[in-house]
Image: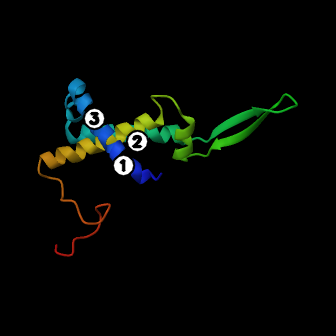
Amino acid sequence: MSYLDFLEVVAERDVAGLRKAEESYGDSWKKRGGVGAFMMLGRKWDRIEKQVEQPLAGSNINNAGGADTWLVAPAYDIFEHIREDTRPEGIMDDIRDLRRYLILVEAEMMARGSAPREQEHPFGHEEDPDE
């Protein structure tokens, strides 16, 4: 299967998670305005970066009783770091939080009528020739 096959699942989980969080926390994410919301995004990114900036080393006991060390995940290889970090509060949790905060920011701007309209380009970056 392709990662594209999981997009709806990810999006549906995000919406469900955001609705549940709203019940507990309300709109506390924007309590301090745009600067506070930006800082929250920055803190999440900083947490992710901190978790992947060092290579992960593994070890294996060899036949002579010593330990062989090998590289499990190079620095900044987020895929390998996620694979190795199976903690519920690990890297993937921070990635989900960051993505959900980004969704909240976009939804807030849409609610304020300030979000630019979606472009035809699949990632929303293509210039509109009519503008």
Name above or below for residue 26 compared with residue 84: above
Q: CA distance from mark 2 to mark 1?
A: 21 Å
Find out whether the residues at labels 3 and 2 contact each other: C-beta distance under 8 Å: no
Q: CA distance from mark 1 to mark 3?
A: 14 Å
**Name of the residue lying farthest toward the front:** 1
Q: Residue 113 placed where, x, y %?
A: 11, 51
Residue depicted at 27% across the width and 44% down the height:
103
Classify residue 79 as left or right of residue 67: left
Q: Which residue is mark 3?
A: 16
**Mark found first going from the N terminus, 2 or 1:** 1
User: Of 74 and 46, which appears nearest the observer?
Assistant: 74
Secondary-structure class at tag 1: helix
**Relative to residue 109, is residue 8 drawn left or right?**
right
Viewer-closest of 73 and 14: 14
Q: Which residue is mark 2?
A: 45
Q: Earlier in the sequence, mark 1 or mark 3?
A: 1
Where is residue 18? Give x, y as percent: 26, 35
Judge from the rendering whether residue 43 lies leftward or rightward of residue 115; answer left or right.
Answer: right
Q: Position of residue 59 (x, y in %)?
A: 72, 34
Nearer the observer, disc 2 or disc 1? 1
Instruction: Count neighbours of disc 3 (C-alpha within 10 A) and say few if under 14, some if 14 to 19, many if 20 or more.
Output: few
The three-letter code of the residue at mark 3 reads: Ala
Circles 1 and 3, Cβ within 8 Å, touching? The answer is no
Give how far across and how far down residue 74 sits, in percent. Answer: 61, 46
Could you give the CA–CA distance between mark 3 and mark 2, rounded to whole angstroms? 22 Å
- Would you name the residue on which mark 1 appears? 7
Mark 2 burial class by Cα count in 10 Å: few <14, some 14-19, many 20+: some
Q: Can residue 39 be seen at all in this image of the molecule?
A: no
Amino acid type at circle 2 is Trp
* Residue 56: mark: none
